[in-house]
Image (spheres, coloured by chain):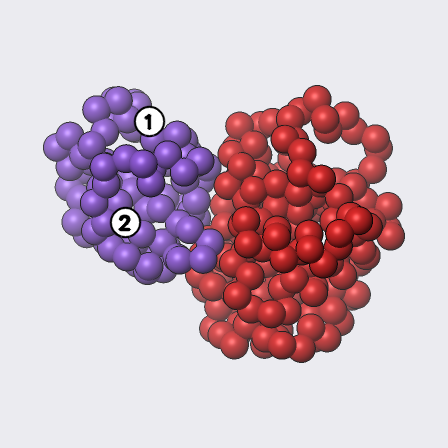
Chain colours: A red, B purple
């Protein structure tokens, strides 16, 4: 399933390319929402790439063993490197953040990528975290930890 | 990625926010260089929101290093090859 993602493998098919950027998977809703979001994007006709930490990718891949939703996956830092070096880019990016590190990764994407950035802010501290965002993006924030429905509702409004 | 973990580094600040790391570098480094997010140093691309400051202290480079599950660290690493490149950015 995992591909190196070099430029040659990305011959554009005319499809919108969407990136799902996963942070640390310690908040339960992330995996569920990531799979749902991948499903919605693919249903819309997008080419979907999921980037994340090793643990985040392991959780999502195990839940989608035949790759019905995930498509291409890559390590989060490799993804940042490839965008920084101009080897890949996306039309839309959905970045997950429940911590300052997640916000910082999303902020990096907002500067290195031309993609439209949707920032999914969740977890117990979602409201406080939302106030720390100092870059251009569309914020989808919900105090979701175990219940994915508030985030699902926000996703359904933008897709 | 991951080469930094194999280098000889000192941790000056541990598991802080990116903003705290930026303030630490601003306050504690006489010489700083602003680099763009994704700037490549020691074979890694820096994560951060502008202004992304990298400090120079003698022959050492001081910079923020963010890990998704652990937050941001401020690291100090000997930077013979990186310092001229950083100074050239000014």
SS at mark 2 in the image: strand
Outermost residue on the left side: it is B58
**The quarter of the displayed image where residue B88 is located:** top left
User: For mark 2, what is the residue?
Assistant: B74
The residue under the point 66% across, 42% down is: A73
In the image, residue A115 above or below residue A26: above
Mark 2: few, some, or many residues within 10 Å (few <14, many ≥20)? many
**Comes first in the chain, label 1 or label 2:** 2
A43 sits to left or right of A21: right
User: For mark 1, what is the residue?
Assistant: B89
Residue B54 visible at all: yes
Disc 2: which chain?
Answer: B
**The quarter of the displayed image where residue A139 is located:** bottom right
A159 sits to left or right of A146: right
Give the x, y percent position of residue B68: 46, 54
Quarter holding the N terminus of chain A is: top right
């Amino acid at each position: 399933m995992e591909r190196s993602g070099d430029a040659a493998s990305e011959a554009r098919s005319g499809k919108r390319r969407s990136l799902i950027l996963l942070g640390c998977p310690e908040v339960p809703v992330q995996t569920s929402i990531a799979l749902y979001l991948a499903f919605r994007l693919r249903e819309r006709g997008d080419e979907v790439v999921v980037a994340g930490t090793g643990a985040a990718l392991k959780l999502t891949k195990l839940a989608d063993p035949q790759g019905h939703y995930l498509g291409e996956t890559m390590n989060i830092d490799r993804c940042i490197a490839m965008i920084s070096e101009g080897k890949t880019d996306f039309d839309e990016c959905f970045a997950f953040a429940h911590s300052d590190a997640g916000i910082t990764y999303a902020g990096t994407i907002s500067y290195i990528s031309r993609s439209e950035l949707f920032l999914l802010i969740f977890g117990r501290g979602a409201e406080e975290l939302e106030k720390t965002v100092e870059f251009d993006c569309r914020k989808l924030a919900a105090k979701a930890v175990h219940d994915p429905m508030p985030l699902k509702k926000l996703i359904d409004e933008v897709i | 990625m991951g080469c930094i973990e194999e280098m000889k580094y000192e941790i000056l600040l541990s598991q802080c926010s990116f903003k705290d790391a930026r303030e630490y570098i601003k306050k504690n480094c006489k010489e700083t260089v602003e680099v763009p997010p994704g700037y490549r140093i020691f074979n890694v691309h820096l994560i951060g929101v502008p202004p992304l400051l990298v400090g120079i202290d003698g022959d050492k480079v001081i910079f923020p290093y963010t890990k998704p599950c652990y937050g941001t660290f401020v690291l100090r690493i000997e930077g013979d090859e990186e310092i001229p490149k950083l100074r050239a950015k000014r």
